[in-house]
């Protein structure tokens, strides 16, 4: 069998090398382990084209496709493995993991159960616990975790899943204790500590969320997410706005699940802001230069496109903008902080829009001045904010969610001082959170000539 290899990493020169089947397979596994998925996949497929009965190669290829994110391809290969080798416990576990990622939780739990029937291991018990939790069977999930911990008292994934099962049952003290243990047992790159924080905030337990954050801070003292979220949970040393590092960290990690997560929350800020803007603009004729501040994955882009002669987005998250770029509606996308972006474009835009971005600003004065600076004569702005209740004191407050809420009178004052004439400040529900509506403002204004 001939396999194309490279002679040196610094100056690759492909060459043909004749190998036996086993030599080629060993080389493919070596490339796979080194992260060279392209060459490993080529070798696996070449081997299977000549020896389709080699089930271990089917398994390797299935694992590789799983790593690439080709879940349907991986699923087909994993099913082929268990059909050919129904007594292979590891293959059933691999199948369960793929099914979980496809949100086929019932089938995943069946695959994990079959793996355990063949060979009982703490890892597969931990995987089964995850599947049961996702199906809402929290007691069964807890039992699976405890069985894994009977087999290995220091098993990190089982401890993590136990913490999630306990927190989901609102057994807060036990859940926090398990979460702290999981943080000690799992390597940093496997930890998912922000999940504990979100669950505790959803349960109305910011003080317990702060306990997790302080334990996490001891492990990662320079993590900007922790600093900001700890201030949000405790109300101590709250910054005037979220740091660029915080915003970038949060949204880079959130990019892949952003739209599906917000859809579950009934998120509608982009639609509400564009609808309010449409009331102030003439019919669309691709006549305006438009800036989309904090464009994220581009949820506002297709809504703005009918008015856009030129549509430019800015954001701090490269991962989010990569998804926006795929829409093909933006003429330019820039990774830059929004006030710096605006200040670099004096009188550069007819329309400036921002949906759910100023919620990461407490003090809005600089943002308002920058919008005025970047607007052309009689240009329009539209944006959303989260709303403080009329009975709450102060101009703005950092909520435990990590987002700021603002008082209506403060918004009026800041825009007026910046030279922006307010047209509307309308109350609106922007999303659901912890089964409750999140109250907001949708604001439209224009530049005073």
Image (cartoon, rainbow, N blue to C red):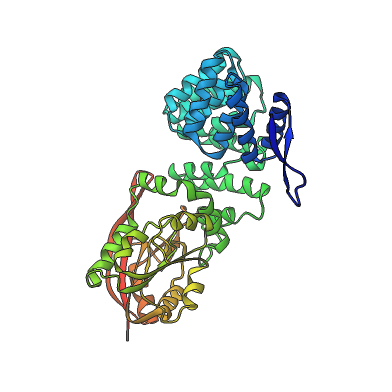
Query: Which residue is at 43% across, 81% downward?
Result: 373
Residue 281: horizontal and vertical position, in percent? 25, 72
- Give the total of numbered labels: 0
Farthest residue, direction bottom:
449
Query: Which residue is at 51% across, 73% downward?
Result: 340
Of the pair 20 and 208, the residue shown nearer to us:
20
- In the rendered image, which quarter contains the N terminus? top right
Side of 200 where 28 appears, left or right: right
- The answer to which quarter of the image holds residue 159 is top right
Q: Say above or below: 279 vs 216.
A: below
Query: Which residue is at 67% across, 47% downward?
Result: 219
Residue 393: horizontal and vertical position, in percent? 39, 65
- The answer to which quarter of the image holds residue 269 is bottom left
Q: Is residue 436 visible?
A: yes
Q: Is residue 171 visible?
A: no
Residue 47: horizontal and vertical position, in percent? 63, 27
Side of 405 where 84 appears, left or right: right
Of the pair 203 and 358, the residue shown nearer to us:
358
- In the rendered image, which quarter contains the C terminus? bottom left
Side of 260 where 178 appears, left or right: right
Residue 4: horizontal and vertical position, in percent? 69, 38
Query: Which residue is at 53% across, 25% downward?
Result: 78
């Amino acid at each position: 069998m001939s396999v194309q290899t490279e002679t040196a990493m610094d100056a690759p020169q492909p060459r043909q090398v004749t190998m036996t089947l086993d030599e080629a397979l060993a080389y493919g596994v070596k490339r796979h382990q080194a992260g060279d998925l392209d060459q490993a996949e080529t070798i696996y497929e070449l081997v299977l084209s000549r020896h389709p009965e080699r089930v271990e190669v089917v398994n390797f290829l299935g694992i590789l496709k799983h790593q690439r994110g080709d879940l349907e391809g991986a699923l087909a290969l994993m099913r082929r493995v268990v059909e050919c080798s129904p007594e292979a416990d590891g293959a059933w576990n691999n199948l369960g993991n793929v099914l979980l990622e496809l949100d086929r939780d019932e089938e995943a739990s069946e695959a994990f159960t079959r793996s355990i029937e063949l060979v009982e291991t703490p890892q597969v018990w931990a995987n089964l616990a995850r599947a049961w939790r996702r199906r809402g069977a929290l007691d069964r999930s807890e039992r699976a975790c405890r069985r894994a911990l009977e087999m290995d008292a220091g098993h990190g994934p089982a401890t993590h899943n136990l913490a999630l099962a306990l927190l989901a049952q609102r057994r807060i003290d036990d859940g926090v204790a398990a979460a702290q243990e999981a943080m000690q047992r799992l390597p940093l790159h496997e930890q998912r500590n922000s999940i504990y924080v979100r669950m505790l905030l959803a349960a109305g337990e910011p003080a317990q969320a702060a306990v997790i954050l302080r334990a996490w801070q001891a492990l990662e003292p320079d993590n900007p997410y922790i600093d900001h979220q700890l201030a949000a949970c405790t109300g101590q040393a709250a910054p005037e706005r979220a740091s660029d590092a915080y915003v970038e960290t949060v949204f880079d990690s959130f990019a892949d699940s952003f739209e599906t997560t917000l859809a579950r929350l009934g998120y509608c800020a982009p639609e509400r802001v564009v609808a309010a803007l449409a009331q102030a603009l003439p019919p669309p004729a691709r006549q305006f230069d438009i800036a989309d501040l904090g464009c994220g994955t581009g949820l506002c882009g297709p809504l703005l496109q009918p008015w856009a002669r030129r549509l430019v987005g800015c954001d701090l998250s490269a991962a989010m903008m990569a998804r926006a770029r795929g829409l093909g509606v933006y003429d330019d996308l820039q990774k830059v902080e929004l006030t710096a972006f605006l200040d670099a474009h004096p009188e550069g835009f007819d329309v400036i829009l921002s949906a759910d971005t100023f919620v990461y600003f407490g003090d809005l004065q600089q943002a308002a001045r920058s919008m005025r600076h970047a607007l052309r004569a009689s240009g329009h702005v539209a944006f959303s904010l989260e709303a403080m209740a009329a009975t709450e004191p102060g101009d703005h407050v950092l909520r435990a969610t990590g987002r700021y809420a603002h008082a209506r009178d403060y918004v009026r004052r800041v825009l007026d001082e910046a030279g922006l004439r307010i047209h509307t400040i309308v109350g609106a529900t922007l999303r659901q959170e912890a089964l409750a509506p999140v109250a907001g403002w949708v604001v439209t204004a224009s530049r005073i000539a």
